Amino acid sequence: MQPVNRQLPTDNQPMSKKKSKVKGNKLSSRHLQGEILRLFKRNPKKRYNPKQIGKKLQVANSKDSIMSAVEKLAERKKLRALGDFKFQLAKGQDASKNASRSGGDRTEYVGYVDMTRSGSAFIICEGLESDVFVHSRKINGALNGDKVRIEAWTPGNRKRMEGVVTEVLQRNTDHFMGTLKRSKKYAFVIPDKEDMPVDIYVDLNNINNARDGEKVVVRVTHWHEGNGRSPEGIVTSVLGQPGSNDIEMKAILINNGFQLDFPEEVMAESEDLRADIPLTEVSARRDMRKVTTFTIDPDTAKDFDDALSVEYKDDGAFEIGVHIADVSHYVKAGSALDVEAYKRSTSVYLVDRVLPMLPERLSNELCSLRPNEDKCTFSAVFTFDKNDKLTDSWFGKTLIHSDRRFAYEEAQAVVDAGEGDFYDELVKLDKLAKKLRAKRFNNGSIDFDAEEVKFKLDEDGKPIEAYVKERKDAHKLIEEFMLLANKEVAKFIQEKSKGQEIPFVYRIHDEPDPDKVQDLANFAKELGIQLDVSTPDKIAAAYNRLTAEAKTNDALKLLEPIAVRTMSKAVYSSENIGHYGLGFSHYSHFTSPIRRYSDVLAHRILEQNLGDRTLRVKKEPLEEKCKHISAQERKATAAERESIKYKQVEFIKDHIGEDFEAVVSGIIDRGIFVEIKENKCEGMVGFETMDEPFNVPENRLKATGKRTGKTYKMGDTVRVRVTGADLSRRRIEMELSEEEEG
């Protein structure tokens, strides 16, 4: 999780600059709360209602959204309600009365810790556009991912807020993996994670017979407040001597807060589920078992949670069914399975394994849409006319029977060959998917078709080849129909909400940060491409142009990941602001309940609102669930990236001393990061290995030699030699090869 570096205007800036980033835009809930609070702080004696606030800020958010934001601020005691829907700044929030010696007004926030390697941290707080920097001396024992209470202020004339942790409210995890160091009287576990800065004390009675130097899992039983104080714990698992692939992958999962095994009661509950489908259940569902249906998945997939069906009508119209495993049929709210699924919230996909959200009894058997088996599904069925125009949508519980399981490569081969199993249906789906895709891009969707690194592993899990996965039309076919289902489900709920909101789980994506976008445009200009980033719509068009031109220009290809980093993070929320990256005003996640708990929630709410039924869940608890699921998703993403980095370092260890062609992919004060073209392994060339010191400007888009003026820019091609590979630190060291320096 990277800290958000967006900067807010300070109170001594002109009003026009303050409004420029929000005027006419629809803000996220967090951003909106921040803007509202700043409005009240600038006018501490004024009283405003939601309509007045909307006029003052000139934002595109609805009156209901503004009302929700001010109510949340009132709950946090930032504002006080006066009656008649009017609010005023709460006592103690007036900046003029709260000046501190630090040079700014201290305000209390709750947020999550994003720890850096130095031990300092950025605190991500709701209601603040920028993260709050906390020095390691003021972290008060908080760790990465912890939920904390802080006091924050803006020192002097600086823009970034700083703060101090006053209380740890909730630990991100209490399980850690590390190396046991044993003495005659006690033992310590030295955690593997760099962002866990203290060792864990373990009494010899609690080491589980572990020997000195072995890898263990330790559960913290008692935390001690204050910096540098060791928590106490007990060893729950002994994994053995370090170094094996299996142990290192397990370490990545555990250190990111994921438990390897399911609790006994969860496993028992999954085994007790009946495999047959009762007749009463069959009669309660739309029977689609005779409709041509198949799945298309990776060749290594074991769980198949989505299927497509095609049925032609007499008038030339046809129905496309998107059938999703009906996990909510088996996982009942409040059950042991449900509690554990929510706790995990997501399956985690490492290079060589999957840590599932649900036990295999569900994910690989009962809920997996395996061929030639009757399965319970929750379906979105779309009717298209003979001109491929969407004319109707239907949602409901169904019964299907998959006729064929395709791997992506098999489905693509049928389309390319012009013959094979279900050729007519595959071609129909492929042509329609391409039309849907083209329409999506015309409506503002951004084409971030990022390269995905894959590995070929030997029988011991060691990588023997690293390559970029090729995405063909069969992959995009499935993607397009999943997007359609997710969009239409959210649209259905929104349309039924007219008059009174039906709280739902939306997948939202805010607009990109203007300052970061401008930096990208400035750098692109240096590479010879002009990007118009004056409005959100033009930013999307500029990014699509960048993607198109990068296909024939390697230097521009390096701009794509930089462009991704300018984007906000997509998250789950009960507050719909749309999905900027996809260009959708309504979007949810409905299509992967085997591996995402958000989809399980969406299924339950959707089912309760089909037909004439209307059921509104409480929004506040739903929003808390959305926050938890989003946090778990970030941890899963971090684990997945770490496993890729580990395998890259492991792969490159066999190539130390070899030269490669690489591209400059990043620049910091200590050196340049380069990415090897043929295998995507990234390492750093330190400036200390070069012949002169270098200057690095604030935007870090280039480095210039202080003596010769030699410049290295993002996207430059260089020749490098691999000099080291440190698996424990997941780092690859390089230097410029002799021919490059010459």
Image: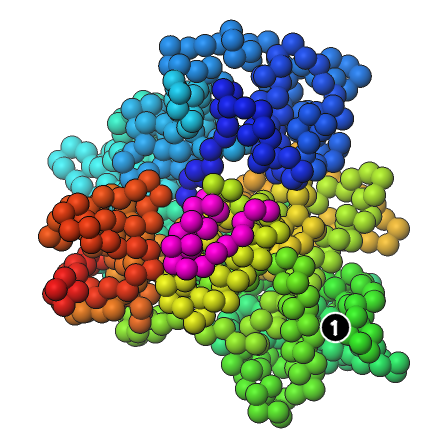
Label 1 belongs to which residue?
320
Quadrant hosting residue 715:
bottom left
On the picture, is 113 further left or further right than 240?
Answer: right
Secondary structure of the residue carrying tag 1 is strand
Residue located at (59% from left, 52% from top): 538
What percent of the width, then of the height, locates residue 692? Answer: 12, 49
User: Which of 459/271 is in front?
Assistant: 459
Tell me the colour scheme of the image. Answer: rainbow
Residue visible at 78% across and 61% down in the picture: 395
Q: Please state if 338 lies on the left or on the right of 647 as rendered.
A: right
Looking at the rendering, the stretch of residues picked out in magenta corresponds to 516-535
Residue 218, relative to residue 537: is it above or below?
above
Specify whether 34 is left or right of 6. right
Q: Does the magenta stretch include residue 484?
A: no
Amino acid bearing label 1: Ile
**Residue 532 covered by magenta stretch:** yes
Q: Would residue 236 be visible to someone looking at this image?
A: no
Q: Residues within 10 Å of mark 1 (few under 14, many from 20)?
A: many
Q: Which residue is drawn at 40% across and 68% down?
A: 553
Q: Is residue 19 visible?
A: yes
